[in-house]
Amino acid sequence: MKKLENPPPALRGAQFRQAAGLLGLIMRHSEKPADKHMETYFRQQKAMGVRDRGFVAETVYGCLRRRRFLEYLAGENASSDTLVAVYLLASQGWSARALTDAGFAGDANGLVARTRTLDKTTLPLAVRTDLPDWLLERLLVQLGESETVTLADALNQPAPLDLRVNTLKADRETVAQHLAGEGFPAEPTPWSPLGLRRRERLSLFTSATFKAGLFEVQDEGSQLLGLLLEPKRREMVVDFCAGAGGKTLHLGALMANSGTLYALDIAQKRLEELKPRLKRAGLDTVRVVAIAHERDARVQRLHGKIDRVLVDAPCSGTGTLRRNPDIKWRTINLEDITAIQQRILIAAAALVKPGGRLVYATCSLLREENEDIVHEFLVRHPAFRVLPAEEIMARRHIQIPGAYSADGALRLYPHRHGTDGFYAIALQKTAS
C-alpha cells in the first residue's frame, strides 16, 4: 500500500479532521457515491491545497477499502475519527504521538498495542479480504477461497490511471510523447492497443494534451468492450446505456466519425456531460438521446435498424472496487438489478437488424449479472448466437491469457489482467 507523506505537526490536525469529517459524511450518506461526496466537499473547502486534498482523498479511500479490517481493530461502532486513526497507524506508520498531536481524542496507545500484536493469519476470512458477507459468499462459490483472497487483495489496491488515445487525432506513441513532454510519462497498456497507463493518479485535465482532445480517461478493460463490438464506418450503432459517454467516444473514433452513433440513457444530466467531450474529441456524428425507459418510443423507432448495439448494463459495480470501494458497504438488491438487466438486454436486442451484433457487458464480478442473464436471454431468443470473444480479439492481434470463459465471453479480473473486473459477450443475430 502506498505510504502517504507524513505531514509536519502543524498540518496534521487539519488534515486529520478533514479526512475524518469527510469519511463520516460518506458513511452517514452511503446512498450517494463517495466520489460525488468528495467533489462537493473539495469545492466547499476552497482553502485546501493540492497536498491536503491528496492526503484526505487517499486516506478516505484507504479507510473505505479496509473498513472491515479497521472496524475489527477499532470496534464495529467506531467513529470516523477512530477509523482514520487506525488506518494511519496500521497502513501509514503513524505513531501514537503523531495521532495525539493531530488531535485524536481516543486511546492512541491502546490502538497501537492492538495493531502491533495482531496476528493477521487468525483473522476471519471476511476481515482478511475486506469484503461484505454477501459478496464474499458468492465469490467463494465462483472462484474458491485461494483465488478469492488473491482477487480481494487486488481489489483493495488503488487502480492505476488508464487513458484511451483518441485515434481521430493521434496515435498512441504521439500522445505518449506529448504527455512526457508535459511531465506526465505514461506506458502502453498490455492488452488494449489504444491505452496508456500512469501509476500516479495526478490530474491530467489541465494538460494541453487533454485539452486538445488527444485522450480520455478510460480503464483498459472498458476499452476492450468497444473493440469487441467492432463498429465499422458508415454503420448505425447504439450505445444503449451511454452514461457520460466514455464508450460512446471510443465507438465514434472506431467508426472514424462516420455513420450514425446514438448515445441513449435515462440520465439526462450525465448525457449533458457528453456534449463538451464530443466537441473536444472532434466527433459530430453522435446523436445524444435521453430516454424515459428502455421501452421509450424513441427506442422503438430504431427496432430492427441497427448494425451494432453496445449494452454496458447498470450493475452492482463489484468489478470497480479498486476505484469505488464504498460500493462494498452499500445495500445492494441483486434481484432488482438483474431484473433491470434482463429488461434492458431484451429491449436492446430488438434494435439489432438481421446479421447485426449485440455486446452485453457489465463491470460486475457476479454470475447472476453476467452468465445467468445471457443464458436466459439466449434460451428465449434463439435468433441470437454467441461470437467467441477470443476469435474477435485474435483478429485484432490481441492475446489475453486466461480471459476467455467457456461460454465464449471475455472475463477480466484485476488480479489476473490488471484491469477493472468486466464481463462481455458478443451475440450475433441470424441473417434471416
Image: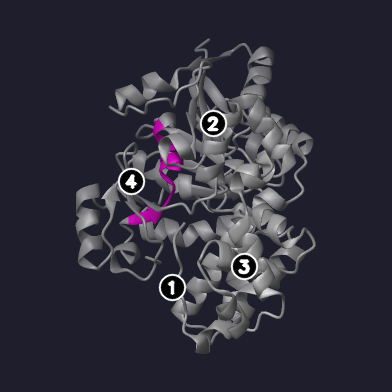
Secondary structure type for disc 3: helix
Residue stretch rendered in magenta on the structure? 215-227
> What is the C-alpha distance between the residues marked 4 and 2?
27 Å
> What is the C-alpha distance between the residues marked 3 and 2?
31 Å
The numbered mark at residue 195 is: 4
Mark before the other along the chain sequence, 1 or 4: 1
Mark before the other along the chain sequence, 4 or 2: 2
Give coordinates of residue 70: x percent, y percent. 66, 58
Secondary structure type for disc 4: strand
The numbered mark at residue 112 is: 3
74 or 2: nearer the eye?
74
Could you tell me which residue is drawn at 51 percent across and 89 percent down? 10
Coloration mode:
one colour
Estimate how packed mark 2 is, as few (under 14), some (14 to 19) or many (20 or more) residues with alpha carbons within 10 Å.
some
423 or 342: nearer the eye?
423
Q: Nearer the viewer, mark 4 or mark 2?
A: 2
